Amino acid sequence: MTHPRLPLRLPVFAAPMFMISGPEMVLAACRAGIVGAFPTPNARPIEKLDEWMKTITEGLAAARDAQAAHTLGPWCANLVTHSSNTRLTQDLELIARYQPPVVVTALGSPKPAIEVVHRYGGRVFADVINLSLAQKAVKAGADGLACVSAGAGGHTGFLSPFAFASAIREFFDGELILGGGISDGWGIAGAIAAGADYVYMGTRFIPAAESMAPQAYKQMVVDSHIDDLIVSASITGTAASWLKPSLRLNGLDPDNMPDAPTRHYDSSTNFAGKKWLDVWAAGQGLGTIHHIDPLARIVDQLAEEYTTAIKRLQALPYPQRSFQ
């Protein structure tokens, strides 16, 4: 199934962030003209997911009437397809009912979502961190790939985003989202120039006024820089990028992390008692984020930077004509 490019003001996904992205943030992103996304495991129990999807669809319907002359971005549900997620069937039932235009699958094959989403004309992107997973996702029928690269916050990748994009373009000409340490308009321009169609941007939106992050978390992102990060599988069982100050506040030593637990991603379980509730993730975009702002203001700044970056590229004297 082929699709036209998503109608956006900027080629950006406000990346689905665990415990951070909720309906308010999704709606703010869509109103600002980018893709608003959230992970379905953020809404527990299943009744809350139903409420969230209803809030988003009704909010977008109202926004569509109110801002007919402006670009309204689509919304996206991020679905965990790992075998440990016993709620997957229920999540898919709600996706079929509310029909998000975009679904990104994570921590498993996109196959469970493809038939459901294609039935109503949506598109499925698979979250991948290496070529093997990318090839499997393409073979399974994914419309696009969300390439999580080195520098991404939360569950992160290890490949250079430029090398990753080039390697995937050797065998896949579908839509490509590229993420990993991109936090400004110059990074967006660089990713698009490297072959991506869209950019995943998460850390930049953690301190958005509409994010669900606690105020102390938002301030820690503003106050931190790249050297305040550590990649470890000790919290969730999957390698993720964590803020060292947050680990220390929770009695963990970044230089002596415990062994990784067994991976378990069941959205049916209660949040209570989970050790990842109070430890905070971020990506390598730290150091360029200086304020807690409304999401619309952040997108305005990104748009200005992106325009400046494009003009800079157009003004460069390259390539020059070869001498004969």
Image (tube, helix red, strand yellow):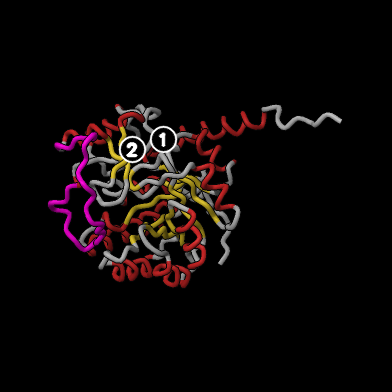
Quick check: is 267 in the magenta stretch? yes
Q: Is residue 210 visible?
A: no
- Residue 100 x/y as whole percent: 41, 61
Q: Which residue is mark 2?
A: 208
Which kind of residue does numbered mark 2 sit on? Ala
Position of residue 324 relative to residue 123, above or below, is above
* 1 and 2 marks in contact (CB < 8 Å): yes
* Span colored in magenta: 251-275
- Residue 196 x/y as whole percent: 55, 47
Quadrant of the snapshot with the C terminus: top right
Which kind of residue does numbered mark 1 sit on? Ile
The crowd level at tag 1 (other Cα within 10 Å; few <14, some 14-19, many 20+) is: many
Q: Residue at x 49, y 54 (%)?
A: 131
Residue 298's disc number = 1
**Residue lying furthest right in this view?**
324
Residue 188 shown left or right of residue 103 in the figure: right
Q: Is residue 189 visible?
A: yes
Question: Could you tell which of marks 1 and 2 lies nearer the N-terminus?
Answer: 2
Which of the 4 quarters of the picture holds residue 44? bottom left
Q: Residue at x 40, y 46 (%)?
A: 157
- Residue 62 x/y as whole percent: 39, 54
The crowd level at tag 2 (other Cα within 10 Å; few <14, some 14-19, many 20+) is: many
Identify which residue, 92 or 50, lies in the foreground: 92
User: How far apart are the two marked residues, 1 and 2, measured between alpha carbons?
Assistant: 8 Å
Secondary structure under tag 1 reads helix
Quadrant of the snapshot with the N terminus: bottom right
- Residue 42 x/y as whole percent: 26, 54
Quick check: is 274 in the magenta stretch? yes
